[in-house]
Amino acid sequence: MKAVKLDGRDCYPSKIVCIGRNYVDHIAELGNEIPKEPVIFLKPNSAISTDIHSCIDGDIHFEGELSFMVRSGELVAVGFGLDLTKRDMQSRLKSKGLPWERAKSFDGAAVFGEFVTFNGDITDLRLELHINEQLAQKGGYDLMMNKPESILGEVKSFLSLEDGDLIMTGTPSGVGPVNIGDSFVGKVFEKDKLIAKAHWVVKEPR
């Protein structure tokens, strides 16, 4: 089992629940329709990685996301996550009405920084992603169509969540390809207070 860090300790999520199309600007930049209900898909534990790798069979796009850890059915910790996507493959699958797993659930498709226990006001959370010291993405609670609490309720209505499972809440606009050598810095803020930070340098394909 792959692990993520929570306050310096290893945790082993059984799965990652992902929310697609949760920011209007991101929906527009990919030319998608605004959904009438949350778009939910899963990544397996095997998708978890602490590194970003480029790909030899098409572009991999980054999607920075506020991510939460679940314990006893509640959101107890927050961290910065990257939902990596094989965009060309996803577009082909979508055009045929096929599932996205090949484009979204491959090994290394879910990259996380360390999670921190969070007891503050969830409405104050926001993210920033900087690439090569340039701001690439920003967003947060106020821009989400589906808020984390309602996402949790929707997921629990049909899916059992184990302690340590993760929920990725969707990405704001600004997604794009990863390139070997790019420096990624993901930050989570509670209002103006930095509470979590992660840094990666994109590596060559495995």
Image (cartoon, rainbow, N blue to C red):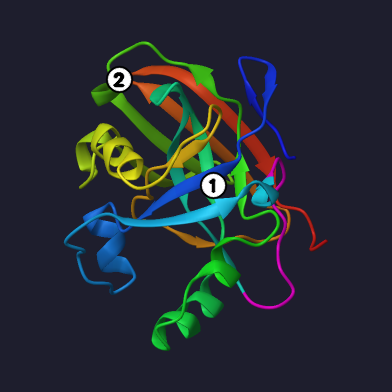
Where residue 64 sits: x, y (%)? Answer: 47, 46
What's the residue at 34%, 48% (across, down)? 158
Quadrant including the N terminus = top right
Q: Looking at the image, is mark 2 or mark 1 nearer the viewer?
A: 1
Question: Magenta segment: does it hold 153?
Answer: no
Disc marking residue 82: 1
- What is the C-alpha distance between the residues marked 2 and 1? 21 Å
Image point (44%, 50%), residue name: 18
Figure quadrant of the C terminus: bottom right
Magenta part mainly helix, strand or loop? loop
Q: Which residue lies furthest to the right in this view?
A: 206
Q: Which secondary structure lies at badge 2? A: loop
Amino acid type for the residue under numbered disc 1: Leu
Residue lying farthest to the top in this orientation: 119
- Crowding near pointer 2: few (<14 within 10 Å), some, many (20+)? some
Badge 2 is on which residue?
Answer: 191
Q: What stretch is highlighted in magenta?
A: 49-58
